[in-house]
Amino acid sequence: MLKVYHNPRCKKSRAGLQFVKNKTSEFEVVEYLKNPITESEMKALLMKLNKKPLEMIRTQEAIYKSDFKGKNFTDDEWVKIMLENPRLIKRPIVVKGNKAIWGDPAEELAVLF
């Protein structure tokens, strides 16, 4: 079963979710703005993605530009920043077992099928 971390207000996230829907009906949607990701869950996601926290930050967001751009943080600090400001998390993230993919563009998700 797939797990899709999704923001319905995001065009790229909607495209990723639609890609998953076109491939399978076996998935769970997590709207992480409504149901926040825990610290341990975020760290597990990063491991499955094989990414550092900074690689999963949306640098075009206004809050990033005003509060975080050009500053140095540890990985643990970036995780906390992501959890406190979940709009900064790149999306969608789709998890299948021990592997996760950032679905931008949505076709990147094909490797999970």
Image: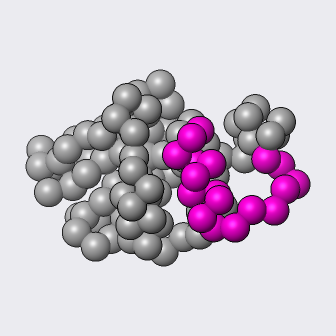
Residue 53 in the image: state x and y as whole percent.
59, 63
Q: Quadrant of the C terminus?
A: bottom left
> What secondary structure predominates along the stretch shown in magenta?
helix
Nearer to the camera, 66 or 16: 66
- Vertically, is 109 above or below 30? below
75 drawn magenta: yes
Quadrant assignment, res 87: top right
Quadrant assignment, res 45: bottom left
Q: Can residue 15 be seen in this view?
A: no
Q: In this view, does 48 lie to the left or right of 67?
A: left
Point 83% across, 49% down: residue: 69
Provide the residue span drawn in magenta. Answer: 68-85
Colouring used for the render: one colour
Q: Is residue 76 left or right of residue 63?
A: left
Residue 78 in the image: state x and y as whole percent.
64, 57
Point 75% across, 32% down: residue: 62
- Vertically, is 18 above or below 23? above
Residue 100 in the image: state x and y as whole percent.
37, 65
Q: Quadrant of the N terminus?
A: bottom left
Q: Can residue 81 be seen in this view?
A: yes
Residue 96 in the image: state x and y as whole percent.
25, 64
Point 59% across, 69% down: residue: 52
Nearer to the camera, 47 or 102: 47
Point 43% across, 73% down: residue: 47
Quadrant assignment, res 72: bottom right
Q: In this view, does 72 lie to the left or right of 77?
A: right
